[in-house]
Amino acid sequence: MKKPLSARSSEPADGIATVWINQLRQGPAPPAIAEEAPVTPEQQRDGDRAFGHHFGDFRLHSGAETGLTPAAPPVAPLTAFHRITIQTQRSPQSSRPTLRQGSSHAEDITFLQERLNSDGATPALEVDGIFGPLTDAATREFQRRHGLIVDGIVGPQTWGALNALERAGIAGPEDVMSGTRPVTAEQHLEVEQALHPNAQTSGGSVTTPPMTGAGVGGEFEQHMIAALDTLINDRVNPENEMPASPDLMDPIREIADAAQQTVEDFYARYIVMASRTPTGSYHPGSFRIPLGDASTRPVSREYAAGWVDYFMSEPSYEPSQVLTDHNVDTSRDRPDRAEYTRVRDLYVSNDTRFHNVRNVIRGCPAEAGTGTVFVQPREYQGLVGRWALFKTMMHEFLHLVTHPNYSRAAAAVGGSARQALIEGFTDHFTLQVWHHVRDSLEANRALRQRVEGNLFQPDLDPTILEDPSTYSQEAPERIVAAVGEENARVAYFMGHADLLGLGAGTLSEAPLTGIATWEPTDSNTAEEYTVRAGGETVAQIRERTNAATITELDGTEVVDDTQRFAAGHRLHIPGIRWYRAIAEDTRAQVAGQHGITLDQLERANGWTHRRGNTPIPAGTRVLIPRH
């Protein structure tokens, strides 16, 4: 999400007329709002993806105890008659027709066959413009390779995937993993210290000091509620409850599309090659950012609790300092996480505070927690405002394209570390894209015209070149310095949290089994091969691994192809790679990501041949042969 701004003037930026807003102010006072419906399961799943947290799954303790007397200022009345104005997700329109076996569009079928061959159709198709059984089979295999619905129909999703691959310059398998390296034990400790400011290392493990100030009416409760009051009350604004006029919403669609395309182009190889499921909300080439007016969004008490959780744990906000001051480590169930949860629930159980939180949510400049990007358009008026929105939309789209397994890992880690992994890294990647755009913007008139619309001016306004305001970059910068930029990108966009050193020994609120699978031995055994059950000859090992050189662990080269090793014997084979599968992985997708064929992957791992969309169980250690 975009960080909510501090209290501001009611006048929109850049001198935009306020007639419409003033007319609303002069109307009758709206009625009080009733309690709203909880977030739907679909919204909750989307919230997991964007925030790594269940915003719709809070169970508030209505009888939460406190030693404080609630003391929050009154809030402006909230309205019950607002309706949500949402520009729903729409697939980009393809100029090509939907094709299936028997279709007669020869020119389009010819293009399809060329693209299927480019992606590695086996056997290669004869490019004849006829959609027959072989083209149908190649289409289905393409759909399996890219996590699409396997039906042989070339519609918006399949055309979208074909177009995305072409735009990314990807033809056939693409070894996206080539720049990654297994994380060492020392790098893992550096990551843990970056995620947990109070962490102490001892004997190769990380610990945090005991929590202080726990208990009803204790110092932790007092300090946290006071910090939340300061944060929330400074941001309450009656205008947050006023639906935006269409003229404020209309330019947002084009700016959102431009931001999405910019991000997709910059990170194409990771986004396009990531493992996806057919029912996933995002597929390259067939997704468009859904938009809504923030002032009209529904906010239940449970959903508000999710935001309070965010305000408490986000390192860029004052309340997170209270966690640091009291050594709160939410990976400990008691007293830490229990106290954290009690105080969070206590805050929104108070009606006035809940109303204030709801008001602030509706005034948030932009946020993607439910899969729809809710925007407060009054934050983004004028030329400078449009470019601020472009930067914000890049950030929000990155939330939507964050790989689900990365979000699951961040959710399991929890607390302030979760925020560093979600918001911190989202801004890390936003800044990379923006700096690329900024450095060529003077010559990029097409993008400027697209963003500026009727405010376009030939001369570049230097004020639009400023970096967007960011969440704390301290933890992301330390982590990237430790594990490398390629590891960070593959973790974030492709879901491999083990490449950030998350797994064994990571402080977390929930188990990381099958989600974040780093092990201390990953780096030392990266090119080790263990002989399979029943034993193997050197020739069999060469065929399986495509090895050029095989040595004993002491460095002695093995040259006799007839030599046989017993099961469990370990050898060193330069160029092989070990990979741990995540929940979305299928055989064909993993093969494609490593630049090898499905046959090579199955042979290396001793698997019986199956269709390309056969899932690989999460956590499986997969051998990638030398290539």
Image (cartoon, rainbow, N blue to C red):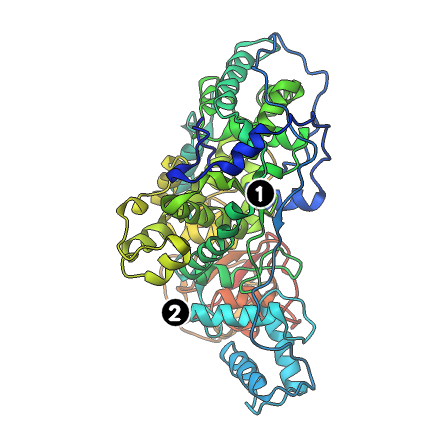
Question: Mark 2: few, some, or many residues within 10 Å (few <14, many ≥20)?
Answer: few
Q: Which residue is mark 1?
A: 293
Question: Mark 1: few, some, or many residues within 10 Å (few <14, many ≥20)?
Answer: many
Residue at 59% x, 55% y is 620
Foreground: 50 or 626?
50
Q: Residue 440 appears in which quarter of the rendering?
A: bottom left
Res. 407 in view: yes
Residue at 32% x, 51% y is 435
Comes first in the chain, label 2 or label 1: 1
In the rendered image, the vertical position of residue 310 relative to residue 447, given as above or below: above
Foreground: 201 or 155?
155
In the rendered image, the vertical position of residue 381 relative to residue 456, given as above or below: above
Q: Position of residue 395 (x, y in %)?
A: 46, 46
Identify the secondary structure beneath mark 1: strand
Foreground: 298 or 273?
298
Left or right? Give the position of 317 relative to 102. left
Q: Position of residue 559 (x, y in %)?
A: 40, 73
Foreground: 276 or 623?
276
Q: Which residue is mark 2?
A: 549
Three-letter code for the amino acid on which mark 2 is drawn:
Thr
* Numbered label tally: 2
In the rendered image, the vertical position of residue 339 relative to residue 112, given as above or below: above
Left or right? Give the position of 535 relative to 278. left
Identify the secondary structure beneath mark 2: loop
Q: Nearer the viewer, mark 2 or mark 1?
A: 1
Residue 166 shows which numbered tag? Answer: none
Residue at 63% x, 68% y is 607
Q: Position of residue 541 (x, y in %)?
A: 50, 70
Q: Position of residue 183 (x, y in %)?
A: 42, 47
Three-letter code for the amino acid on which mark 1 is drawn:
Asp
Q: Kindly report the distance in space between the C-alpha atoms of the residues bearing marks 2 and 1.
A: 61 Å
